[in-house]
Amino acid sequence: MSKKLIIVGGVAGGATAAARARRLDEDARIIVLERSPHIAFANCGLPYHIGGEIPERDTLLVQTVEAMTARFNLDIRTQSEVLSIDRDAKTVRVFEIETQREYDESYDDLLLSPGALPLRPPIPGVDHPAIHTLRNMVDMDRLKHAVDANAESAIVVGGGFIGLEVAENLKRRGLDVTVVERLRQVMPNLDAEVAEPLHQELARRDVRLLLESGVTRFANNAGRVRVELASGETLDADLVVLSVGVQPDTQIARDAGLELNARGAIIVDAHMRTSDPHIYAVGDAVQVADAVLGGATMIPLAGPANRQARTAADNIFGRDSTYRGSLGTSIVRVFERTAATTGASEKTLQRAQVPCRKIYVHRDQHVGYFPGAESMMIKLLFAPDDGRVLGAQIVGGEGVDKRIDVLAVAIQAGMTVADLEHVELAYAPQYGAAKDPINIAGFVASNTLRGDVELVFAEQLNGDAGEEWTLVDVRSAEEFQAGHLPGALHIPLAELRRRWEEIPRDKPIAVYCAVGQRSYYANRILTAKGVASRNLAGGLNTYRLVHPPEPVPEEATRD
Amino acid sequence: MSKKLIIVGGVAGGATAAARARRLDEDARIIVLERSPHIAFANCGLPYHIGGEIPERDTLLVQTVEAMTARFNLDIRTQSEVLSIDRDAKTVRVFEIETQREYDESYDDLLLSPGALPLRPPIPGVDHPAIHTLRNMVDMDRLKHAVDANAESAIVVGGGFIGLEVAENLKRRGLDVTVVERLRQVMPNLDAEVAEPLHQELARRDVRLLLESGVTRFANNAGRVRVELASGETLDADLVVLSVGVQPDTQIARDAGLELNARGAIIVDAHMRTSDPHIYAVGDAVQVADAVLGGATMIPLAGPANRQARTAADNIFGRDSTYRGSLGTSIVRVFERTAATTGASEKTLQRAQVPCRKIYVHRDQHVGYFPGAESMMIKLLFAPDDGRVLGAQIVGGEGVDKRIDVLAVAIQAGMTVADLEHVELAYAPQYGAAKDPINIAGFVASNTLRGDVELVFAEQLNGDAGEEWTLVDVRSAEEFQAGHLPGALHIPLAELRRRWEEIPRDKPIAVYCAVGQRSYYANRILTAKGVASRNLAGGLNTYRLVHPPEPVPEEATRD
């Protein structure tokens, strides 16, 4: 007697699970119930069709019902909403939107892949028709229609993945765009200094960014939206896109008494099984293990969803398969900047009270003599005892994706910073360097673990650090004259061996250069002279991201 | 009493070792002896200055003697050739080229980083002045001068890294270019089918490629070079570039009685120490451990040279540091194709009689709906028992470098193909897919290890495979009509469930599609029906690289 599997949700996880299930059991009855009119559409591509970078709408429909049905012998029912689960009867109650009919469908096993819904915070006026969210094809069509209808201005509320991608694409369409973010930075999964280059990129592209700006009210202004901020400022725009996060779409799971976490995510084991042994769940709606910290986390990303779906299908059809937890590897392109992260961030490590060390490396993605070299900053977080890599963040241009992937694999493999020193990556002038940025990060991190260098961090040096520290700038005269830390003593590296005695020793000494390399050489010289000194981690480049210049007040708000 | 270190050779390994040595010992006396006028020049950039992609010659001079001297307090002597080593006296005999003076210099420790010399095979006429090699700035200047002097045609002998890079750059300069290669493929470190797309790319770019063509003689033809091939064909060109490999430049090591291998490479231990405890050696002149196969190998690449130099300097200055061996990770760009390898190739595994399995994946570097998707082929080699990754080769366009680096780290970490299934890489539409090509390679490889699918390889199917096999093509009608294997039965995947009984069972069944994915689904259906079948690994795409169409004979030779 072959199994009957019902899958709720036909996008990333659901579609993958259905295909995998069929490969495991040719005879199983597999029913996919999807509320929207589409299955397996390209969620992540939606902003780029609005912006025009993906010109053909229908390329976003990665799989059609017809093709998937034919290939995998599935029973796919779109516009079919599951209203409830009867766990005792092992049935689901289905509402067929087109016919308005309700019916029960029985299952042997049930797989929930409902995804998450855009958060719509209970702000007065949030139901204004010109306030959009962007989660599916219907949302996209609606938002694109508004843009096509000659919208001239937009306010994006929330500076996460979708917010920034939407902002870029609306700008590309010529709209006047303002991003309003409640926190002090965009991309909350990044540490603040790694997000800072994205702020700069938005400014460079003439996207206005308002940080630490909560929205208190939306009002109607002759069909346009007026956004009132906690600061008292008001902004007007033709449309608003709300992208302040998502919440698991788990009402039916809750109603059925499945175990959920405090934020409404379904709790599953490593087999992706819920608290009901016949119900599995995957994707944005579940809580998974944090592969670095070991606790529970929620990672609403497509890659993990797909692998969870494969794991769930395997277990449903009798194969012992384990999901290993998520690193949260993710990447965002904002115009010409790319920022990416994998593993734990410094703030999550601090929150979890996990001791860690950090270093910064600024390095080009390939040798400087080959055209197109662009600098990236790597922030590497590692264990103080054994040097195990705990997390990494990178911001830059080309080549960021490669290095974050290399580090994601390194974390998965339990590698240490010493292992990174030995990594043998492919080098040709177009692609890297004989010492890849990853090797350099390994060297720098190992140097600190071995005690070859003591670091001082930009956040330890405030604006008048010169009062507590003797600051030594070892860059060239040209670099020094173009800007330096207040009160810094200037001794170019090449002169340090004969001038080191000029350095006063009444205060602790912090040596710096542009990125931390020349100052490391200087530290080594001073150590040999018996003079203790610290190296400013990541140099002035990181310093300026930790202490960004205050934004220049604008003459007037633009609207 | 501080140490006196002499370093022979001031390019990649030598320069790195000198800088590292200084950081470890501020008081050591460090002398760098370099035969050429330049230290630390960008070896790998030379072809691109000839072609013009790197317009400024002097950007190739990555370090000047003055800057390195000042920064690291070194005694750098260029145009200083070491003639011999007196191991008992611990001195080297130095020939100062400008003054023609000879002198002895003593050392406590000696580090040899002499590099390798271009092979100049003893072919009659090989000393023709229009026959070039390309290894250093002097060679480059000479070759570029010849090109600038209105050369119209060139013959490149040897289709390795340098040969192909030179061919591309000469073509870019408008020359008529022929590549003559003794073997049946270019890039001998790649398996043949992975090199095949490079053959096609050369043809597409109008570079003539003569494979299996040995040169028997060079002759002078009124200042031009006439190249005579073993086939009897003769070619004429304004210049010839010889790039048939390199040999360790180890005469002084040999004369000094240091242990060398049969090919003249210096034998070192994991500390980069030679058979003399006070002499270390690094770079293209040494033999190192093969990090996959465990035996000895020679890997003339800049990345390993640099890390070996660091290791040697560490050990010279009392730090226990170990070089872990080389994977041979490397990459070449040929016009718009990129080919890369890491770990063992199929042919080296066969030669070493190491059992392995292989799979092929054809996949875009990022989601197909985002503009610019380009297909790459991944060949993955892994252990039949535990699935440990042994090697990988990739050919394609954008994104090849990233995937080879991910696999290089995976090999270094001892990961298995099951681990690749779980790799969590960064996904956004510009950079990858929710199921990255690496995940897919892991799935496909694990499927074969688990016995979910049996493979048949293109080399097992010859032109009349239809006589020994029942070939089933499960692609669409359009694809089938555009070309298929002779004698193949056509049943589109979507029709297989109702038509599978049409497949004759008198012969073994091989199912194929374009890349091996749809045919895998077909295998699963047939297995469920109780019909054994095999999947053509990598589909028709790989088949066509294993069995490339015969080149169309040319009407006449071009010269």
Image (cartoon, coloured by chain):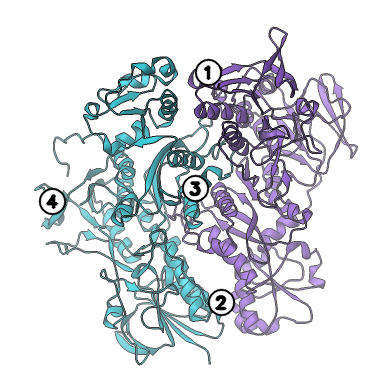
Chain colours: A purple, B cyan
Q: Chain of mark 3?
A: B
Q: Residue at x 51, y 45 (%)?
A: B418
Residue indicated by mark 2: B23
Say above or below: B308 vs B98: above
Element type at marker 3?
A: helix
Q: Which marked residue is nearer to the observer: mark 1 or mark 3?
A: 1
Residue A9: quarter of image:
top right
What residue do we see at 40% from left, 45% from top?
B338
Residue type at tag 3: Lys
Badge 4 vs badge 1, beta-carbon distance below 8 Å: no
Distance from disc 2 to disc 3, alpha carbons, whole Å, reads 32 Å
Q: Secondary structure at mark 2?
A: helix
Q: Looking at the image, which residue sits at the far left?
A: B232
Do marks 2 and 3 share a subunit?
yes
In terms of sequence position, does the residue under pointer 4 or pointer 3 come before the other?
A: 4
What's the amino acid at mark 1?
Thr
Q: Which residue is mark 3?
A: B402
N-terminal label among 4 and 2: 2
**Which is in the foreground here, disc 4 or disc 1?**
1
Q: Residue B277: x percent and y percent?
A: 40, 83
Give a yes or no on whether discs 2 and 1 share a subunit: no
Alpha carbon distance from label 1 to label 3: 35 Å
